[in-house]
């Protein structure tokens, strides 16, 4: 093994070509640059946040210390994002299935185009839409949920009169991440091997059964990676959340009341202009936590996908 | 089990292109019928019309009749899904489901047809089907391992086991050995000889020795030229086709003068 490796390396060295070498240098440089930027961002966050690590608890906004300040934000961020994903992921799978396996070709192309277009809409637009259209529209349903499902902690209420709730925020985020999640899953479904689809149909599977047998198992790792991509986007979404969510701090699963936890990104955007001194360092510390969360989410996604590659084998 | 198929004046089109013209033949039960002919003459197209798999291609359509015992497979109320439950298919490239174990591959069709099967019943059918496909001894200790871990020949027999697990009446095979090595080919050929006791088998093959070895009847398809439709030149008992065919085209093809 090592012999052949050396042999190949020697052969390559003999056949050096200037253009190849130069291009190789450029691509390597680009790869290194990405790592440098990533490390630089982490270092910047660490250095800038440092004073808040060592500051006495009463100097941190809220006067309860760093952990007490950041924890509700982490909670709010995760709650909004996970909820958005729970809404968006199944929808994305259905849309991708419709586009790839049900819609006539013309309609499928058009829908695919619309989905891609939606991904390009700036988040501020979604924020404005959420604030002016969706939030008021959720009041009725929220009251209904409270009345009939009030015993579920999620709908404990009392319903917010503005509709600018965690529930609305999650819906807006779900709409925002839907295109990217759908696009990733659609690509995977399009590549389902014909021979596995035919294998199930030849057994007398209906189209739905064929999808369960051949398409979904083949696309499962892409469903996960698409979802994680969407989750990453939801975690970091700032403007839309800042506009839509009326946050008052606190940790609660109550989705429809007016007392909502804030999210890290929106909190930074809203507080930053008014802050100074340790308050700024504290905001940056919360940014560091967000950075860490997105890294972890991406790493988990990678791990899940790698674990599944030997199973998805398109043979 | 093992039904007769009567095909009458079957034309098969892709859009406006007629790929197969006016085929009539009777496919005998409990026998292997081999279809031979130069490539592009419509053998696969014809085979897939027998279980309506061609309908996956939106532009494809047929005219004519395919009657299995007394059932018209193209009758207006006939569901292609039901047709395929009775007319199974094995493909050129082995295609076990990669995410399923060997056991689940064999049970896949069963679970479609009869969702409320007890575990012991499923076990039984899986073993029976794997035995029927001459694969049981090789895989009985690793039923829970992925089917994609088997050799090509084993995978193809797994696909045959999967197809016979749903107890079809007819088994269609489109060049089932063309991706296999000689030893695996031999194993699959042996299997066909066994399976014809219970099934009607139609096999497309490029390999004339194989047709001569495994089949009871041989049909020769030919094509006048590119862009022309494929036609059935003749079909007869295999020894007759290979010794005294009626048409010179058949004789020329089997003696290797073209194709
Ligand atoms: N999906 C398709 N769409 C259009 N034409 C096709 C399609 N599949 C096969 N054909 C055409 O039908 C003819 C017969 O093909 P095929 O049945 O695959 O032949 P064989 O199996 O005998 O090699 C060929 O001319 C081929 O180009
Ligand atoms: Mg063919």
Image (spheres, coloured by chain):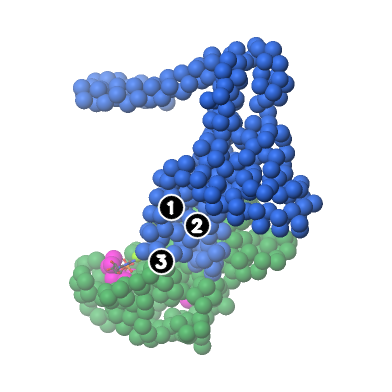
Q: Is the residue indicated by label 3 positioned so its CB lies within 8 Å of ligand 1?
A: no
> How far across and how far down the image is residue A75, in percent?
67, 34
> How far across and how far down the image is residue A236, in percent?
53, 34
CB contact under 8 Å: marks 3 and 1: no
Number of the label disc, if any, that sits on residue B84: none
Magenta highlight range: B30-42
Q: For marks 3 and 1, give the CA distance.
A: 16 Å
Q: Residue furthest right?
A: A151
Residue A165 vertical placement versus B177 (above, below): above
Chain letter, green in picture: B
CB contact under 8 Å: marks 2 and 1: yes
- Label whose residue precedes the other's in the sequence (3 or 1): 3
User: Which colour represents chain A?
Assistant: blue
Residue at screen point 29% across, 22% down: A25
* Quarter-of-image position of residue B158: bottom right
Residue B145 showing in the rendered view? no
Residue A264 vertical placement versus B96 (above, below): above
Residue ID for mark 2: A95
> How far across and how far down the image is residue A12, in percent?
28, 23
Q: Is residue B128 magenta?
A: no
Q: Chain of mark 3?
A: A
Residue ID for mark 1: A115
Q: Is residue B41 magenta?
A: yes
Residue B247 vertical placement versus A22 (above, below): below
Dot 2: what SS?
helix
Q: Name the quarter showing ligand 1.
A: bottom left
- Residue sitting nearer the eye, A71 or A271: A271
Residue ID for mark 3: A104
Residue at screen point 74% across, 53% down: A146
């Amino acid at each position: 093994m090592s012999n052949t490796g050396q042999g190949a390396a020697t052969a390559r060295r003999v056949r050096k070509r200037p253009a190849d070498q130069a291009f190789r240098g450029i691509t390597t440089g680009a790869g290194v640059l990405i790592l440098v930027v990533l490390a630089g961002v982490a270092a910047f966050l660490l250095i800038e946040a440092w004073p808040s690590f060592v500051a006495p608890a009463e100097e941190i906004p809220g006067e309860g210390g760093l952990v007490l300040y950041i924890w509700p934000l982490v909670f709010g961020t995760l709650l909004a994002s996970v909820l958005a994903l729970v809404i968006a992921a199944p929808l994305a799978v259905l849309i991708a299935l419709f586009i790839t396996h049900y819609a006539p070709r013309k309609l499928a192309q058009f829908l695919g185009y619309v989905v891609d277009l939606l991904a390009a809409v700036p988040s501020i637009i979604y924020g404005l839409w959420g604030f002016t259209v969706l939030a008021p529209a959720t009041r009725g349903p929220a009251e209904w949920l409270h009345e009939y499902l009030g015993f579920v902690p999620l709908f404990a209420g009392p319903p917010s009169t503005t509709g600018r709730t965690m529930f609305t925020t999650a819906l807006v985020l779900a709409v925002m991440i839907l295109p990217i999640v759908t696009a990733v899953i659609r690509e995977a479904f399009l590549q389902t091997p014909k021979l596995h689809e035919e294998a199930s149909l030849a057994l007398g599977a209906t189209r739905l059964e064929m999808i369960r047998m051949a398409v979904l198992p083949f696309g499962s790792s892409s469903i996960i990676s698409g979802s994680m991509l969407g989750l990453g986007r939801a975690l970091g979404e700032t403007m839309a959340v800042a506009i839509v969510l009326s946050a008052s701090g606190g940790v609660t699963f109550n989705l429809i009341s007016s007392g909502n936890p804030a999210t890290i990104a929106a909190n930074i955007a809203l507080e930053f202009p008014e802050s100074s001194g340790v308050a700024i360092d504290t905001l940056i510390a919360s940014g560091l936590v967000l950075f860490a969360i997105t890294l972890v989410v991406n790493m988990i996604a990678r791990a899940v996908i790698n674990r599944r590659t030997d199973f998805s084998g398109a043979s | 089990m093992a039904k007769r198929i009567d095909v009458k004046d079957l034309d098969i089109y892709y859009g406006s292109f007629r790929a197969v013209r006016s085929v009539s033949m009777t496919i005998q039960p409990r026998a292997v019928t081999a279809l031979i002919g130069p490539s592009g003459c419509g053998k696969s197209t014809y085979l897939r019309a027998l279980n309506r798999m061609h309908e996956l291609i939106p532009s494809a359509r047929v005219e004519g009749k395919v009657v299995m015992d007394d059932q018209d497979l193209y009758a207006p109320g006939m569901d292609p899904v039901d047709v395929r439950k009775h007319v199974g298919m094995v493909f050129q490239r082995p295609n076990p489901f990669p995410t399923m174990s060997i056991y689940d591959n064999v049970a896949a069709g069963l679970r479609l047809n009869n969702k409320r099967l007890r575990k012991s019943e499923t076990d039984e059918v899986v073993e029976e089907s794997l035995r029927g496909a001459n694969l049981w001894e090789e895989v009985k200790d690793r039923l829970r391992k992925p089917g994609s871990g088997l050799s090509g020949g084993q995978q193809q027999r797994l696909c045959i086991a999967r197809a016979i697990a749903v107890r079809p009446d007819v088994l269609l095979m489109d060049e089932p050995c063309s991706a296999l090595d000689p030893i695996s080919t031999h194993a699959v050929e042996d299997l066909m000889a066994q399976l014809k006791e219970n099934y009607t088998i139609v096999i497309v093959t490029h390999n004339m020795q194989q047709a001569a070895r495994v089949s009871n009847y041989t049909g020769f398809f030919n094509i006048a030229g590119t862009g022309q439709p494929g036609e059935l030149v003749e079909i007869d008992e295999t020894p007759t086709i290979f010794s005294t065919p009626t048409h010179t085209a058949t004789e020329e093809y089997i003696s290797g003068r073209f194709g």
